[in-house]
Amino acid sequence: MVAGVHEDRGSRDAGRKGGEQEKRRVTHLARLDVDAQTARALVEGRSGAAPAGAPGKYRCYGPLGRFLGLVEASGETLRAIRLARTDIAPGPGPRETDGLALES
């Protein structure tokens, strides 16, 4: 399930840590928010569900707003083109990535 496509140009992302360089390279692309199931599929190298009727490349974010990387939607399939490193927690606290618990 795909949470939503947004047409912002990255202003909300400015100043956030983690993947900052990658985000600057793709700010011209629309933002795509995905649910935990789709985020997990992408970081595990599998395809996920694409937004209906919206083919193209997107900046992809997990359910907690963490930048995942660049994805491409084609037909009903969403595939990762290039992902940001997701094995590092975004800050102090449990090792978790957008609701995807990671083994310690």
Image (cartoon, rainbow, N blue to C red):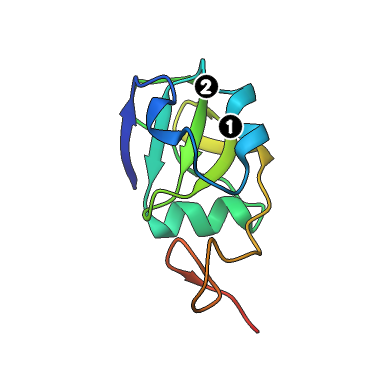
Residue that label 2 marks: 27
Occupied quadrant, residue 11:
top left
Q: Is residue 64 above or below residue 92?
A: above
Q: Nearer the viewer, residue 96 or 78?
A: 96
Residue with the most extreme bottom position: 104
Residue that label 1 marks: 23
The amino acid marked with disc number 2 is Thr
Say which element carries label 2.
Answer: loop
Compute the Cα span from label 1 to label 2: 6 Å
Q: Is residue 39 above or below residue 6?
A: below
Occupied quadrant, residue 43:
bottom right
Q: Position of residue 100 (x, y in %)?
A: 49, 68
Residue count near mark 1 (Cα–Cα under 10 Å), binned few <14, some 14–19, many ≥20: many
Determine whether, in the image, residue 28 is placed left or right of residue 35. right
Q: Position of residue 79 (x, y in %)?
A: 59, 38
Residue located at (52% from left, 44% from top): 67
Determine whether, in the image, residue 64 is placed left or right of residue 90. left
Quarter occupied by the C terminus = bottom right
Residues at marks 1 and 2 touching, judged by CB atoms closer than 8 Å: yes
The amino acid marked with disc number 1 is Lys
Q: Position of residue 96 (x, y in %)?
A: 51, 71
Q: Nearer the viewer, residue 60 or 72?
A: 60
Q: Position of residue 77 (x, y in %)?
A: 50, 36
Residue count near mark 2 (Cα–Cα under 10 Å), binned few <14, some 14–19, many ≥20: some
Q: Nearer the viewer, residue 50 or 21?
A: 21
Q: Is residue 5 above or below residue 104?
A: above
Say which element carries label 1.
Answer: helix
Q: Is residue 52 above or below residue 33?
A: above
Residue located at (56% from left, 75% from top): 95
Residue located at (43% from left, 22% from top): 30
Residue located at (55% from left, 55% from top): 41
